[in-house]
Image (tube, grey):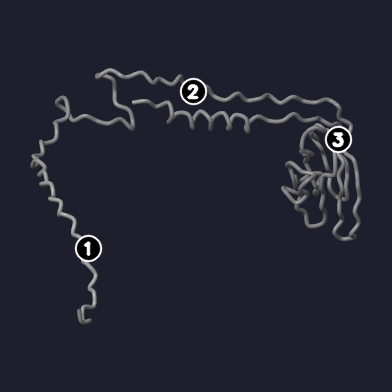
């Protein structure tokens, strides 16, 4: 039983999956640019935060850990991982946000605070392109189309033979000989009837 054509879709799917899993290159930037909204005053302020630097915005302390952009040849995708703390009583801070911000989608995974809104605007200053490792698709074992021996184990999709040897033959079916029909006699062609002529006239 040949499995060449049944394994072909699996090989194609694994190749496509490996290509989509590979990550694109990105640029690491030293500075992140944010905008903040004070909901009480309605004032919007733009501010910059260097990587691993903490900046005070209102009552919040914003720390940027990384800021990535894409090369100019790829689809823009600006992201930054930030940590936001709110000072509490007795000098103990409270972590109110820790996660990624996306410049293209400010409302996605954004900071939720009753007084302040913070969103990522841009990353700047980066020139070094970080090449992401490309994942290689998993190699499948070679396809074996050779005929298997009688003692090889059965595999899914095989036609099973009953225990005890070869499968029994179906019973013979008796059929009657075909009757040959006698040739039909050809009827002699009839002559067309002569037209009737009016013979009422005197001779």
Residue topped by disc 3:
53
Left or right: 136 as drawn, with respect to 155? right
Mark 1–mark 2 Cα distance, whole angstroms, equals 86 Å
Q: What residue appears at the point 30 percent right and 30 percent down from the top-left corner?
A: 158
Mark in front: 2 vs 3: 2
Proximity of marks 3 and 1: CB atoms separated by less than 8 Å: no
Q: What secondary structure is found at the residue carrying circle 3?
A: loop
Q: What residue appears at the point 62 percent right and 30 percent down from the top-left corner?
A: 19
* Front-lying residue, 162 or 195: 195
On-image quarter of the N terminus? top left
Q: Is residue 197 above or below residue 141?
A: below
Q: Quadrant of residue 145?
A: top left
Q: What secondary structure is found at the residue carrying circle 2?
A: loop
Residue topped by disc 2:
140
* Front-lying residue, 88 or 79: 79
Residue 17 percent coordinates (x, y): 58, 32
Mark in front: 3 vs 1: 1
Mark 3–mark 1 Cα distance, whole angstroms, equals 120 Å
Residue topped by disc 1:
192
First in sequence, mark 1 or 2: give its number. Answer: 2
Q: Is residue 197 visible?
A: yes
Crowd tier of the residue under label 3, counting other residues whose Cα lies within 10 Å: few below 14, some 14–19, many 20 or above: few
Q: What residue appears at the point 20 percent right and 82 percent down from the top-left corner?
A: 202
């Amino acid at each position: 039983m040949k499995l060449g054509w049944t394994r072909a879709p699996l090989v194609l799917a694994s190749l496509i999956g490996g290509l989509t899993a590979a990550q694109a290159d990105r640029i690491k930037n030293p500075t992140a640019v944010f905008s903040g909204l004070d909901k009480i005053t309605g004032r919007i302020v733009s501010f910059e935060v260097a990587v691993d630097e903490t900046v005070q915005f209102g009552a919040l302390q914003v720390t940027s850990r990384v800021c990535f952009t894409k090369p100019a040849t790829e689809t823009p995708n600006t992201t930054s991982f930030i940590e936001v703390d709110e000072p509490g009583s007795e000098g103990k801070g409270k972590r109110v946000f820790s996660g990624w911000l996306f410049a293209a989608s400010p409302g996605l995974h954004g900071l939720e605070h009753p007084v302040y809104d913070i969103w990522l605007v841009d990353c700047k200053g980066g020139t070094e392109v970080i090449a992401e490792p490309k994942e290689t698709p998993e190699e499948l074992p070679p396809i074996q189309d050779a005929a298997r021996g009688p003692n090889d184990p059965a595999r899914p999709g095989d036609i099973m033979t009953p225990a005890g040897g070869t499968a029994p033959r179906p019973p013979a079916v008796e059929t009657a000989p075909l009757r040959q029909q006698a040739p039909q006699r050809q009827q002699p062609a009839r002559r067309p009837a002569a037209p009737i002529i009016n013979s009422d006239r005197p001779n």
